[in-house]
Amino acid sequence: MKKGLLLILVMLLTIHIHGQQTITLKDGKLVNKVLPTIPTRDVSISSSGEITVTYAFSSAILQKDDLFKESYWWKVDGFGFEEEPGKPSVLSRLDQFSIPKGVEAKVEIIDSFYKDFNFPITPARLPLIDSGDDVYTKENVKPIDSSLGIYPISIVEVCNIQQYRGNGILSVKVSPIQYDVKNKKIRAYTKIKYKVTYTTSRNSAIVDNNASPITAVDDNFLSNTTLNGLNTNEQKEDVNSQNIQDYLIISVPKYTEAVNAFAEWKKMLGFNVHIKIENSWTPNSVKETVKNLYAKKNSLYYMLIVGDQEDVPGSYSTHGYASHVTDLWYGCMDGENDFTPDIYRGRLSVNTANEALTVVNKIIQYERNPILTSTFYNKGVNCAYFQDVLPKDDYADRRFAQTSENVRDYLQTQGKSIQRIYCTHEDVTPTHWNRGMYSNGENIPVELLKPIFAWNGKATDITSSINAGAFYVLHRDHGATWGWGDPRYTVENVNSLSNGNKLPVVFSMNCLTGQFNSNSGTCFAEAFLRKPNGGCVGIFAATESSISGYNDALTGGMFDAIWPSPGLRIVMPSQSSTAPTPTPTYRLGQILDQGFARMTEIYGANAMYTRYTKELFHCFGDPSMQIYTDVPTIFTNVLISRRTNNISVSLPNVATISFYDLVNGTVSSYIGNNITHNVNHPQNVTICISGHNKIPYIQAGEAPTTTYIQNETIVGPKTYTGSIIKVGSDVTITKPYGPVIFQNGEVKLTANEIEIRPNTTIKKEANLQIILK
């Protein structure tokens, strides 16, 4: 950093701190309580696209480390801790920017101010996994490397460029403090101002001429996850625009009936569905199938695997804490170092044809015939554990219950009623949240103190709540392949559910509950999804042991994706809403990927456990399915007119309007309220009008009649009619195989669609007339 860019204010203070205090950076004053430390961030974008970001920091929390008694945590809302062993626990977060295809980005610091403080900072430490009761000790926390000098070297740096559908995502790491290891000084910045500029370059690392562009009108991923919200789709602001989205289904023959039923429903909703069924699959063949279709269809947004690990295997990864299986890479189209998915992924992990039909029918019924009871959509269920193991001091060791409370409090401001099902050990008396990496040691709410709150939630409470009806269920604690640790809830409990069509979306934010490659039988997520006459309609779960902190930030990002206003952030040490999400999303696949994006802001794109967490968590269900968040209502004042050569649809409000052509199987979908669709057989087109929290309006088309000409010698005059006419030696199994010969005379074929296959002969004496309606 050039000194000429800085106005340096140096203040040397010796600070004697006990417990937690808030320090005012302007004057160094200490207050003996925890106060909000949310920095301000101003983002301005010039007409040329130059972006200027200005941070202002007014205060920080200082907390004595219980492990290293002479050192301190430095905490600022919205910023995560360094994790690499041997480094100081300095703070950082990522700002993410969209980069148009074919340009390079340059980042430079414009201005900054700082003050110096004399005190030692605590060492960085690896995050703890969610599958045990581990705590930090001096044996598993490495002291700070004395040879580091000033760390980090730069307060603003480019750390990563990912890609999303041909557009770069630039990650800029902002670090509001630096640590002088030798002199044990903190350099705390009160202002950081930097700019991002774009330059055209033919050799830009982010150029990918094979990348699929953003084609869907409703693709808001970049606008929801980057500061400049790049709008690469010029149609986004247009009403009555075509909205093209392709959907790939990968499976094996035994699930064909379920796959076809699911595909027909998705076509009705407006997706161009591609089915790929093979007798066997490998991770490479799955990836190549997706990649090849993505190269041909730039509107491929969704993929669904139907089958478990033995049918369609996930890819094995050794990255992170433990080896594991993952479907993440099937959706990443930009090389092995890019782990921002371009395609939303889902898996129906089933083992029999009946299980596949059960799951598919649950999804179709959820979308097509939703429950109309308000109590179902007003109720959510939060399950969590207060862990206090070592030292047993009434402070939480992890953030499980506090994250659940953050979600609960936020959703109650959205008008929801959230039931708490919490537990702890009998000899634990919860009084405070975590006072280390995960929070600030705040008092828990009065209503959660014993004996006001019993902290004795159990499996029967969870079962009763789900059977009564709840539109979502969250669990935040430990997990295993067999179920949730605390409150304990197992595969056997799931199998006893009788919630019928009151199907929740489940957020299983813990370890191992989605391990679909388990050798020990059906995992918890599989059991929940497969359960007939109940269970769930979709579940998010991890395939291996997952990470505390990351799971909490991911959870907050997922709920923020659904309810973005005013914004929910669950970050360490507390919450910040400095990067509001502009547009809600309700589709399960995007909910998961937006959660990943918010988690990345706190922990960094290059952090080992960022990629690891992305590889672990899966959507077990349909990634295109929208979660209902309120009582669905019907479409009213819909006007549909089927004319000779087109269909017109109009209604008061904007919706998705889809046309499924039953003659040729094509799908056309639009977003708007006044659409005219050209077609020469309007009676054979099914029309579907859909939208969030709306009951689909479906007007079915007439099934086409198909005339088969096979194994015939035809002498005119003769006329064949139908919606579809197929001519050839093997166009149907209902007739003997054999060639077709138009021998002589006048023969008329009249239909909407006429297909003439090989082994068809037209003699010169014949007058064949083909008439398309």
Image: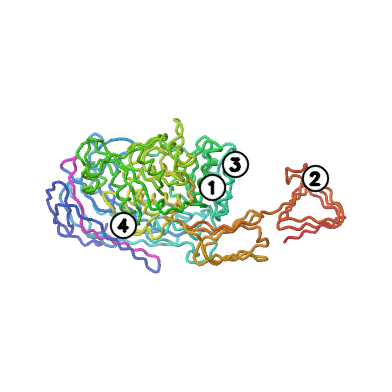
Q: Residue furthest top?
A: 520
Q: Nearer the viewer, residue 238 or 624?
A: 624
Tell me the quarter of the picture where residue 519 sits: top left
Q: In whole angstroms, how far apart are the C-alphas of marks 2 and 1? A: 40 Å
Q: What is the secondary structure assignment of the residue under circle 1?
A: helix
Q: Which residue is mark 1?
A: 291
Q: Which residue is mark 2?
A: 711
Query: Of label 2 and label 3, which has the lower sequence position?
Result: 3
| Residue 357, horizontal then vertical, whole percent | 55, 41
Query: Of label 3 and label 4, which has the lower sequence position?
Result: 3
CB atoms of marks 2 and 3 within 8 Å: no
Q: Which residue is mark 3?
A: 256
Q: Could you tell me if residue 435 is visible in this image?
A: no
| Residue 577, horizontal then vertical, whole percent | 31, 57
How many marks the image carries: the answer is: 4
CB atoms of marks 3 and 1 within 8 Å: no
Q: What is the secondary structure assignment of the residue under circle 3?
A: helix
| Foreground: disc 3 or disc 1 | 3
Specify start and end residues of the magenta stretch as a single range. Answer: 49-69
